[in-house]
Every structure is written in structure tokens, then in C-alpha cells.
Amino acid sequence: NSCLRLEEAYLSSSVQSIANVFSGSTVKKVTVEEDHPAFKTDEKGQLLTSVDGTNIILVLGEITGKYIIPDNVVQISDNAFQKQASMTGVYIPDTVKYIGDYAFDSCYSLTDVEFAENVKLTDLGAGAFAKCLALKKITLPYAENVGDNSKPAQGYTGIFGYCVNLEEVMLSDDMDTISHNMFCYTLSLKSIN
């Protein structure tokens, strides 16, 4: 992203869709026009969601410690938490059905990914946890669609690509797909159960 000086953005009601517009940028705050038909932000302008709050589109600013996804969230969009380098943990409730491509990519300090007991995902996107350098262990729930098997992965598009300290992955008993390049460059991986 080449918007190296952009710190604030305004979304008028005419903007109905955004995709990866601010990921990797220096934007720290988004303001949304009052009564916007598609989006809303929290009071700090650092959490951009769908107007009904069921889709986390983008998290700006710095998250430190563990982040608890609200119980009403169904979708975590592509790149939503990308580069949250100080986030150490995330709790994902059973309401979440979709985790987008690169949703938690480059969360370098992420050590704890906790899924609620009954999570059943429809989609777990390519690179969803790529470059989570501190991640050592994860238990994945069932996911109907895993990664992107429709085309060869490029670079670190595997779900755990470049998670160089990942040692153990526990898969749901009913998980029936391991995606292309799912574990590329997971140099410390010792166990997949």
C-alpha cells in the first residue's frame, strides 16, 4: 500500500463496498457518514463493521493483548486484523461462520487462537493465519471450504504460511480437506492430529 501518510479516512453514504482499501496502510481512524446504509465504526473510528455489526471489515489502531470477537459477528473479512502485531490472542465465538483471506495475517505476537466449542465455519480463507510468527499450537474447527484449492497457492497463501514456530495443529475430527500449501514454511511443525 502506498498511502504512507494517510491517517484518517471518511466514508460517505455513496460508498457501498470496500475491499482491502486500507489494509497495510497508515490509516488510524475511519469516520463513517451518519446513518450510512452499509457501514459503522466504533466511537474511536478504529473498528469498521457492517451496519448490523455482523461483519468485521477492518480493525485500525493497535490491539494489545487478547481480542474477543463479539457474539453477534458472523464474518471476519479479508485482511480484517492484518498486521495487528501486538495482539497476543483472539477468541472466536460460535456465531462466526466465515474467516476471510489473510484475516489474521502478520499478527506477529499471536500465541493464542481460541475457537468456541461449537464453531462450524463455511469458509477459512487462504493465508488466514499466515506469518503469525509466535503461534506454536492451534486447534482448528470444521471448515467446509478451506483455503483456495481452485488455483495454486502463490507465496505464503497457505493458511499457516510462514508460521515458522508452529509446532502442533489439531484438526476437527470431521475436517476432510487440507488446502494447497496449508503448511508452507511451517519449519517447526511436528504434529498434525
Image (tube, rainbow, N blue to C red):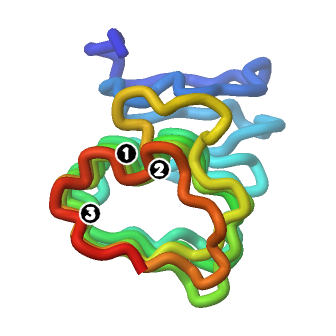
106 or 174, nearer to the observer: 174
Instruction: Give the SS element for disc 1.
Output: loop
Answer few, some or many: residues within 10 Å of disc 2's Cα (few below 14, many 20 plus, some between 14 and 19). Answer: many
Give the Cα distance between marks 1 and 2: 6 Å
164 or 19, nearer to the observer: 164
Residues marked 3 and 2 touching at CB (< 8 Å): no
Q: Residue at the location (30% across, 57% down)? A: 63
Q: Residue at the location (73% across, 21% down)? A: 15
Which numbered disc flags the more N-terminal residue, 3 or 1? Answer: 1
Q: Splitting the image into 4 quarters, where does residue 7 fall? A: top left
Which mark identifies residue 26? Answer: none
The answer to whether residue 48 is above or below residue 163 is: above
Residue under pointer 2: 128
Which mark identifies residue 110? Answer: 3
Is 54 on the left-hand or right-hand side of 124?
right
Viewer can see residue 36: yes
Which percent across, then down, holds residue 116? 56, 84
Q: Residue at the location (30% across, 75% down)? A: 191
Answer few, some or many: residues within 10 Å of disc 1's Cα (few below 14, many 20 plus, some between 14 and 19). Answer: many
Residues marked 1 and 2 touching at CB (< 8 Å): yes
The answer to whether residue 103 is above or below residue 191 is: above
Instruction: Tell me which amino acid carries mark 1.
Output: Asp
Given the current orientation, which residue lies at the most extreme top position? 2
Residue under pointer 1: 105
The answer to whether residue 95 is above or below residue 47 is: below
Is 110 on the left-hand or right-hand side of 56?
left
Viewer can see residue 61: no
Figure disc tally: 3
Which numbered disc flags the more N-terminal residue, 3 or 2? Answer: 3
Give the Cα distance between marks 3 and 1: 10 Å
Instruction: Tell me which amino acid carries mark 2.
Output: Ala
